[in-house]
Image: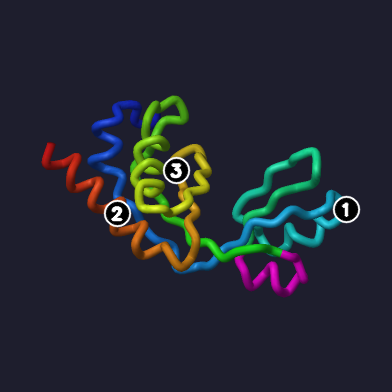
């Protein structure tokens, strides 16, 4: 099944959903990654400095992984194409205009936005308002 490309349809149907889990972003050394995988990280990304992991906060604490902040994940429930243009910009702009940082991870079916945990409810409301505005347009 192919993902949606049309920005108007994506915005009208994005149905943002807030995950109750608290996540952290951290960088672990390559020799530590084997300890992390049994804890089922949500995502990993290899960089020159080490491996970035997105991991449930409880798992990070069990593994004594240092992290700076707590995040919550908002999943856009619409099946967006990896070639779609503008969805990330529209979402991140709405959040930035309200001083909320957005760390976006695009996966095969959905886009996931990680926002500071203390801003998560406000971010969800802002994205729901964006959906309503697009449906009314």
- Look at the image and give the residue range highlighted in magenta: 56-66
The disc at residue 126 is 2
Front residue of 78 and 124? 124
Residue beneath label 1, please?
31
- Give the x, y percent position of residue 68: 65, 63
Q: Is residue 74 left or right of residue 106?
A: left
Please give the name of the residue rendered at 46% of the width and 50% of the height, measured from the top-left corner: 113
Q: Residue 15: x percent and y percent?
A: 29, 50
Residue at the location (35% across, 47% down)?
A: 97
Q: Mark 2, mark 3: which one is toward the viewer?
A: 2
Name the residue at 63% across, 55% down.
54
Does residue 50 appear to the left or right of 133 in the view shown? Answer: right
Work out how far the residue at label 2 is from the one at label 3, CA to CA, in angstroms.
Answer: 16 Å
- Answer few, some or many: residues within 10 Å of disc 3's Cα (few below 14, many 20 plus, some between 14 and 19): many
**Whether residue 3 is situated above or below residue 28 in the rendered picture:** above
**Residue 126 lies in the magenta stretch:** no
The residue singled out by tag 3 in the image is: 111
- Closer to the camera in the image, 43 or 61: 61
Question: Under tag 3, what secondary structure?
Answer: strand
Tell me the quadrant of the picture where the N terminus can be found: top left
User: How many dots with numbers?
Assistant: 3
Looking at the image, tell me whether mark 2 or mark 3 is earlier in sequence order. 3
Position of residue 90 relative to residue 55, above or below, is: above
Spatial CA distance of label 3 from label 1 is 30 Å
Q: Position of residue 80 (x, y in %)?
A: 39, 35
| Residue depth check, mark 1 versus mark 2: number of the one nearer the observer | 2
């Amino acid at each position: 099944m192919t993902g949606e490309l049309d920005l108007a349809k994506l915005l009208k149907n994005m149905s943002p959903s807030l995950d109750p889990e608290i996540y952290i972003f951290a960088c672990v050394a390559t020799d530590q990654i084997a300890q992390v995988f049994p804890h089922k990280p949500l995502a990993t990304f290899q960089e020159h400095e080490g491996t970035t992991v997105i991991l449930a906060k409880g798992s990070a604490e069990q593994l004594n992984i240092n992290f700076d902040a707590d995040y919550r994940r908002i999943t856009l429930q619409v099946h967006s194409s990896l070639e779609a243009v503008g969805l990330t910009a529209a979402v991140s702009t709405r959040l930035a205009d309200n001083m909320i940082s957005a760390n976006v991870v695009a996966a095969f079916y959905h886009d996931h936005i990680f926002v500071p945990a203390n801003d998560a409810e406000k971010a969800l409301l802002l994205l729901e308002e964006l959906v309503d505005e697009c449906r009314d347009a």
